[in-house]
Image: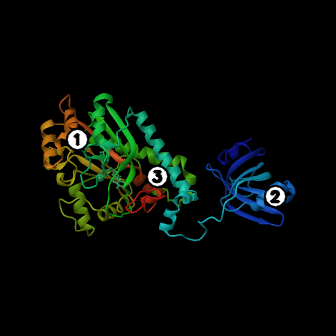
Amino acid sequence: MDTLISKFSEVVGQTVTIKGWAYNVRSSGSIAFLQIRDGSGFTQAVIAKQGVDEASWNAAVETTLESSVAVTGVVAKHPKQEGVYELQATAVQLIGKAQEYPIGKKEHGPEFLLDNRHLWLRAPSQWAIQRVRNAIIYATYDWFRDHDFIKIDSPIFTPSACEGTTELFEVDYFEDRKAYLTQSGQLYLEAAIGSVGRCFDFGPVFRAEKSKTRRHLIEFWMMDAEAAFVDHEGNLQIQEQLVSFIVKRVLETCQQELKILERNTEPLTKVVAPFYRLTHAEAVKKLHELGSDIGEMDDLGADDETLLTQQYDKPIFIEKYPAAVKAFYMKRDPSDPTRVLNADLLAPEGYGEVIGGSQREDDYEALLARIREHNLPEAAFQWYLDTRKYGSVPHSGFGYGLERLVAWICGLHHVRETIPFPRLLNRLEP
Ligand code: 4AD
Ligand code: MG
């Protein structure tokens, strides 16, 4: 019977077959140990020369690091370690013998590992990161389904910018005009709420970032959400509920992964709504006390976010940024028109921005004026302006960067490890 290593607790004492890769191999005169990974987990197969036929013994001894194998044997509880199982082999088959594996036990630099990303993905740490990423994705879908949001798929080729024109990827395909790769599906979701009320999308987005930082990729996965009849305050509540749910789910389902990553989970247990809230003005004041020279009406820089979030044990919303540093679609704060009804959600422990969101400008004339002020091509925004002509409603939304969430929850320094095949300035391969 074929089984997965993760199911071993259910088949103790039974004879099963597992198929996977040998990530550690060791043998002496009459006994061999193959450490095997099958995608679901890790185990050790013990092969006694006396206990298997000659072909199996030869296969075991010939198995090199990262060869693929099938091992049949009896599942046994580890004599000493609770919850750990071994396979006492009765047959071994070498499926694909590996040449000398380039990633060894010694420390490798990040460029070497990224050049070998197609193989590095097999490392336990990378396995763990992808599993946490997967748990975050499923938790997101679950939360939205349970809160009456419909998934709406937004397009990738777009006629205009959503988040500023300096980081746009141009596509030369359509005659007489430029197209761009999407920076966020937000504007399309704003149209879709007129149909479905509440929706979200989840897909790759593109930013032609010219700088190398630990928080930026040029291709990354964004989840945008949008809801009709939700104001700025309601928007923050949706975000803190969603993020608390995601973190709780990871803590419930990814203990083994977090352990492999040596993630201290104590700070994650504190990620429970409500989160902290500071206005941008309060944040600037606090940053000045901490030694930053940020200007009163400046955007928060990466260093400011790091400095600020090191002071808090929960995520923090920074609300009401100066309108001048934010996108054209954000609604102005009625009590101070130099500011907008937005919030960035900053993750604690120095991580910084993981979500950007706002209440949207729902007045046709005000939105048109903003598009003009920002020198955006009016013709390309006619469809978007239509949404304010035919039954405009107060509405709000936000977008999270999946890789930023994964980096924070896994406790990683750089986002490049959070996506299977990172795309960065100067990196297109593998
Ligand atoms: O703050 P941003 O630019 O907001 C938007 O795009 C809105 N349209 C979202 C919305 O309201 N629906 O991007 C959202 C999030 C950021 O908070 C950050 O987590 C992530 O996307 N992000 C990046 N992640 C990796 N690499 C980059 N270059 C990123 N740029 C933004
Ligand atoms: Mg942002």
Q: Is residue 430 left or right of residue 240?
A: right
Q: Residue at x 31, y 65 (%)?
A: 303
Instruction: Residue 397: tell me if it is visible.
Output: no
Foreground label between 3 and 1:
1
Residue under label 2: 57
Q: Are marks 3 and 2 in contact (CB under 8 Å)?
A: no
Q: Is residue 271 above or below residue 303?
A: above
Foreground label between 1 and 2:
2
For the residue pair 157 and 319, the one nearer the viewer reads as 157
For the residue pair 132 and 429, the one nearer the viewer reads as 429
Residue under label 1: 360
Q: Is residue 306 left or right of residue 55?
A: left
Q: CA distance from mark 3 to mark 2?
A: 48 Å
Residue under label 3: 269
Q: Residue 193: image x %, image y %?
A: 30, 32
For the residue pair 268 and 151, the one nearer the viewer reads as 151
| Residue 297 image-quadrant placement | bottom left
The amino acid sitting under disc 3 is: Thr
Q: Residue at x 36, y 55 (%)?
A: 218
Q: Is residue 163 left or right of residue 312?
A: left
The amino acid sitting under disc 2 is: Trp
Q: Secondary structure at mark 3?
A: helix
Label 2 neighbour load within 10 Å: few <14, some 14-19, many 20+: many
Q: Is residue 283 above or below residue 5?
A: below
Label 1 neighbour load within 10 Å: few <14, some 14-19, many 20+: many
